[in-house]
Image (cartoon, rainbow, N blue to C red):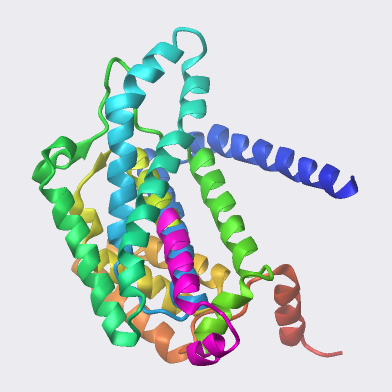
Amino acid sequence: MKRAARGAVVLAAAVVVLGLVDAVLPRLLNTYYLTILARIAVAVLAAVSLQLVNGFTGQFSIGHAGFMAVGAYTGAALSVYTGAPLLAALQQFMPAALARALYFPFPLLAGGIAASFAGLLVGIPALRLRGDYLAIATLGFGEIIRIAILNIDAVGGARGFSLSVQSGVELRYESLGAIAGVVALSVAVIARLVYSAGGLAFRAVREDETAAEAMGIATTRVKSEAFAVASFFAGVAGALFAHAEGYVHTNSFTFVRSFEIMAFVVLGGLGSLTGAALAAAVLTAAPELLRGFGEWRMVLYSLLIITTMLVRPQGLLGSRELSLALLRRALARRAPGP
């Protein structure tokens, strides 16, 4: 009972904090900075979801942007073709803000489910491969997904797909508190999965796939499950991106984007969810923070990545998770003695 009460208090506190974020930040920051914060949140979710496959299961997938594209276009299409008239009807009976808040989870779930289904279609045959062969296969599947979407006129084709005002309803959802809440909940679910007893199977496959099979673990099934779950949350990240930006184009989901997400995972530390989140936040914000350097901006960005890999080849956090206890130990080591 105490645990349930504690959980209710934490949930209520989180809702209050996210509500304050929505109320205060738009008064302190302009639209440009709010957009950057939303992109950081999307990058964090994409990186943490890929960590499940690359970091905890030990597979080498570099087609993650393709599953983000599936989620983005599925969520956007649902909002444009179904959500707009539904929201218009709901707003006749309740405030617009409440109607949008009640509707917002549906395109995210639709995008996640569609991406998870695509992940299963790709993962079942591809995850019988290993190493470089798996990387090439996932990269190819990611590009196939992107090019297929590029040729579907119902979602804009080469023009891109806009979540413009439909039926007098604004479909773009810029609530930073809601976006942060979705990302936090998703990361908590992934953490619960990988650090539960069932999550040991992922790490067993990573350490030695042959030994895991000898111990009775169905390695192909475990890898497929990891791939499907990672694809689900990549789809949620894509749907978040589409609704935060208000416009989606396949150029946002090229293989370059897949490499960026993989860089977040490697630089953060393979096997560290908080490391991937930290690297995604820093590397997403860095190009904007360096914008004042003009044409040298991307050179400095590249040097930042190279320097990080030279100084911390195991990643920012290695395989550890950032926690208050870890911070206290680090500070204690740096504190001067008496």
In depth, the one of 319 and 217 nearer the eye is 217
User: Can residue 257 be seen in this snapshot?
Assistant: yes
271 up-or-down from 81: above or below: below
| Secondary structure that dominates the magenta span | helix
Residue 215 falls within the magenta-colored stretch: yes
332 up-or-down from 96: above or below: below
Q: Residue at x 53, y 46 (%)?
A: 182
Residue 336 falls within the magenta-colored stretch: no
Give left or right: position of 43 versus 296.
right
How many marks can you see?
A: 0
Q: Position of residue 173 (x, y in %)?
A: 40, 33
**Which quadrant is the C terminus positioned in?**
bottom right
**Which quadrant is the N terminus positioned in?**
top right
Q: Residue at x 64, y 71 (%)?
A: 322
Task: Give the farthest residue toward the top.
Answer: 92
In depth, the one of 203 and 108 nearer the eye is 203
211 up-or-down from 80: above or below: below
In depth, the one of 308 and 323 nearer the eye is 323
Q: Position of residue 101 (x, y in %)?
A: 51, 28
Q: Residue at x 57, y 39 (%)?
A: 21
Based on the displayed image, in which of its 4 quarters is residue 234 positioned? bottom left
User: Can residue 288 be seen in this snapshot?
Assistant: no
Q: Position of residue 153 (x, y in %)?
A: 11, 39
36 up-or-down from 23: above or below: below
Q: Position of residue 83 (x, y in %)?
A: 36, 25
Give left or right: position of 58 versus 15.
left
Q: Residue at x 63, y 76 (%)?
A: 200
Task: Give the farthest residue toward the right.
Answer: 2
Based on the displayed image, in which of its 4 quarters is residue 154 positioned? top left
The residue range painted magenta reads: 208-232
